[in-house]
Image (cartoon, coloured by chain):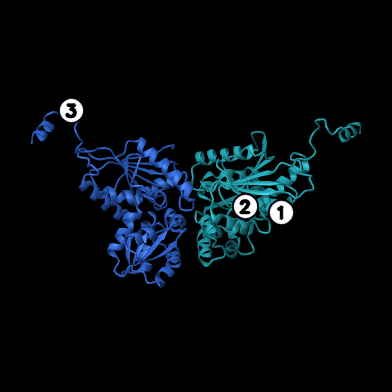
Chain colours: A cyan, B blue
Amino acid sequence: MADKDSRSHNKEDSQPAVEDSRPIGVFDSGIGGLTVLKELALQFPQENFLYLGDTARLPYGSKSPHTIRRYSEQNIEFLQSQNVKAIVIACNSASTQVPEREFAGLPVYNVIGPGSQRALEVSEGLRIGVLGTRATINSQAYTKQIHSLNPHAQVFDQACPLFVPLAEEGWDSDPVTNLIVFRYLSSLMQNQIDTLILGCTHYPILKNSIARVTGSSIQLVDSGEAIADWLEEDFMAGRLLRRMNPTPRQVDVTTTDASAHFTELAHRILKPVKADDFRVVNI
Amino acid sequence: MADKDSRSHNKEDSQPAVEDSRPIGVFDSGIGGLTVLKELALQFPQENFLYLGDTARLPYGSKSPHTIRRYSEQNIEFLQSQNVKAIVIACNSASTQVPEREFAGLPVYNVIGPGSQRALEVSEGLRIGVLGTRATINSQAYTKQIHSLNPHAQVFDQACPLFVPLAEEGWDSDPVTNLIVFRYLSSLMQNQIDTLILGCTHYPILKNSIARVTGSSIQLVDSGEAIADWLEEDFMAGRLLRRMNPTPRQVDVTTTDASAHFTELAHRILKPVKADDFRVVNI
């Protein structure tokens, strides 16, 4: 009680923080991570967010592990320089190369853990499909993570290199996209999966086309939704401190390259969340 | 005559060069430029070649003019440091941002001029279609170049952002590719073009699918073939000196990122040309 009293009265003293107004940093190779930003911004309406899309060097999914790691470290360093309180890696290809839960003193959230855990929670028959970029599938990150959590689960994966350009072209719910989804998913369907991880943050943009092929009996797992649960757990446990400031929060979007096409798509993906600022940064 | 005699007898003296063994440098954002390298290597079987594919940062076609220019300059500087005798920009997106015919003292060949000239040579009705990446089409580089050569020509263009990923996925001559080609080309066909510039060095990989839609009445112009003619002209005019060495020539391929998928595709595209060396460089 004495402690509590002194804390409330001596505001000048350096006290343990009880709130943290710094933004949550979110990065991706491009626009796909905006699906994650949207989920987080909706789930945490008081939090500030700073998004970094490395659009000058996208996509990561066709690049080597070494290059993806190098670019990811540069992105984290940029966000750190902007004084964020946590890093969310809203990119599966980058997540496969940054397994750390902490980096440069900041808590780090990558999509592999949350996506794997959520898939095991919803799967009834433990037959789990994973879609991802070539880099993500080659890394076997999901397969290893799922097996470490439950060795009885069976994992079937498929690289879908055309999904990112289809999402970026804006051809969601298009007959051509349906056809390509059907092509990529046919072997997974033959393996009678009951759960499907959308292992790339671009893929929720194509969710309608994917659901049309999988039907209602296969559970789709969206990593953006799954990662929000992990942040909420850490807020509850006090590992992360919430922003308590009653003023409106700020959602800033930065990219490493300018493009009118990107800005237009970004607005579409973020809806109903509104970005307060769009700007280009050099990292 | 005295001059000629003294030249042939005093081999130790510094004489004007009559041959040049240095390689021709060729660069692209990725593997598409290999279609140009192949044409050049076949047409000039005595010449050494050094190819640079900036695979770590591909694709260029979705990037801004400023970023494309910056990356292109870095590529040219790398090739210059490798002692090349000329630079071939085997990438349309990069060509739109490097209009110079000379850079750092080296002759530079970009694909826009040769492609435009060839199109005007083969077009009978002067109704010319241009396919390209978003960056190439937005730049209007072909339209301006064609109009500067012949103001009476009519140009119809179309960005095809999915062609590069389709080529890189290896889905050439595939029903899905045919469908996407048909979608992109329909407005050009309605405009009754008689000639079609493949304004991206990836597109010759999809030539079968494109030709299936255009039929035999539309002339396809491949920039790789067109640029070889310009080099030959400069060899004839003495602006470029040929390699005269009777030893086998060398074709070296470098990339800024390693990938087994890339190497496999590269062999397929280059056939029947064989690369002597594949290696990764950091630029």
Q: Residue furthest left?
A: B1
Residue A260: x percent and y percent? 54, 56
In the drawing, what numbered circle is on residue A42? 1
Residue closest to the eye, B248 or B111 = B111
Query: What residue sits right under mark 2 in the picture?
Result: A34
Tell me if residue A38 can be seen.
yes
Q: Chain of mark 3?
A: B
Residue A182: x percent and y percent? 52, 62
**For the image shown, how many numbered marks are present on the structure?**
3
CA gap, disc 3 to disc 2?
Answer: 66 Å
Q: Amino acid at mark 1?
A: Leu
Are tags 3 and 2 found on a single chain? Answer: no
Q: Amino acid at mark 2?
A: Leu
Identify the element where label 1 is drawn.
helix
Query: What residue sits right under mark 3 in the picture?
Result: B13
Residue closest to the eye, A35 or A224 = A35
Q: Amino acid at mark 3?
A: Asp
